[in-house]
Amino acid sequence: MPVINSTKTDPNKILPLHYPWARRHYKAGVANNWVPEEVSMQKDVEQWKSDHVITADERRMVLWNLGFFSTAESLTANNIVLAVYHHITAPEARQYLLRQAYEEAVHTDTFIYCCDTLGLDPDEIYTMYETIPSIKDKDAFVVSLTQSVFSPTFSTEGDDNVRKFLRDLVGFYVIMEGIFFYAGFAMMLAMRRQNKMVGIGEQFEFIMRDESIHLAFGCDLIQTIRAENPGVWTAAFEAEILSLIERAVDLEQRYAWDACPRGLLGINAEQFCQYVEHIADRRLERLDMPKRYGTPNPFPWMAQSVDLQKEKNFFETRVTEYQTGGALVWD
């Protein structure tokens, strides 16, 4: 039963499973469940109000990231609910999309929580996609890849339309969630490593863990559609995908210089740009495409932030790397 364009699939009948990878991603998402109110923001508030702890450049970086992510999460949620879910016919993949839509809502709530707690001006944060060119260009680029899929008359029937759907999936899963988010993740987690804005840093860490699962699901979905429609992924289409990813890297690097123009925390915009190239190569490899940049990872510590098995001192902080009982493995 194909993951799209199936006339035989009952969307209400999830068993027997035909795509176990979708079920694995769903269970991984459940095991990583969290809500922003579980994270203390007291230290963040104290630092944000101080004139001596958070510098003007650091404030700019925090605001730029809140401004970008607050809009990007909503765009991603809209794409899942209004476009992708409608065209997926495999029930286990639909179940994951419902889980992802919930997580996007949690992420959106996170930025509400941050704005309310820090006393930020919501008109400033939530209009940055219009007022900050580097943010506006990133959002506009992803939206441009999905306009045809949002049409109420769009269908995934035929190779050309399947390619349009794949372009949408690459736009949101690979580019938005897999490339555009990662300079921001590195910035906020770098601050956390300096013991600054640790509450927001912890929430960004949780978001990144969610996004790593979103990315894995999206790439598995892309590869499944590709395998089930072997005439779709042509050399010309692969060249188009590479061009889109190159454009995404350029936009994310411009955003990195915009959000962090003078360098801070012992790192600088050039390193963030190198990290974006490294991440882009990993996304290309996940799509079975050759590396484009060959840039080494300047932030090896970033990999630790998606490891759910880290241990924490119970008396110093809440145990956040928990798994629910149904996900535990007993010896």
Image (cartoon, helix red, strand yellow):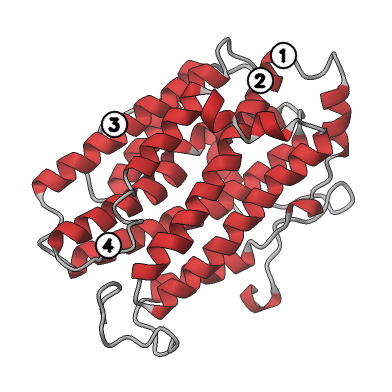
Which of the marked residues, 4 or 3, is nearer the chain's N terminus? 4
Which of the marked residues, 3 or 1, is nearer the chain's N terminus? 1
Left/right of residue 110 with respect to residue 289 in the rendered view: right
- Find the distance from the CA under tag 1 to the CA under tag 2: 6 Å
Residue 38 against residue 24 in the figure, above or below: above
Q: Of helix, strand and loop, which one carries label 2?
A: helix
Q: How crowded is mark 3: few (under 14 residues within 10 Å), some or many (20 or more)?
A: some
Q: Residues within 10 Å of mark 4 (few under 14, many from 20)?
A: some
- Identify residue type, mark 2: Arg
- Find the distance from the CA under tag 4 to the CA under tag 1: 47 Å
Residue shown at the point (44%, 73%) measured from the top left: 94
- Find the distance from the CA under tag 4 to the CA under tag 2: 41 Å
Q: Would residue 41 be visible to someone looking at this image? A: yes
Q: Of helix, strand and loop, which one carries label 1?
A: helix
Judge depth for marks 4 and 3 and give the one in front. Answer: 4
Q: Of helix, strand and loop, which one carries label 4?
A: loop
Left/right of residue 292 with respect to residue 124 in the rendered view: left
Residue at numbered disc 4: 154
Residue 167 against residue 271 in the figure, above or below: below
Is 97 in front, or is 294?
A: 97
Res. 246 mark? 3
Q: Do the residues labelled 4 and 3 touch (CB within 8 Å)?
A: no
- Identify residue type, mark 4: Phe
Q: Would residue 272 be visible to someone looking at this image? A: no
> Percent x, y for residue 129?
53, 32
Q: Are marks 4 and 2 in contact (CB under 8 Å)?
A: no
Residue at numbered disc 2: 60
Q: Quadrant of the N terminus?
A: bottom left
Residue at numbered disc 1: 56
Res. 19 mark? none
Is 314 in front, or is 275?
A: 275
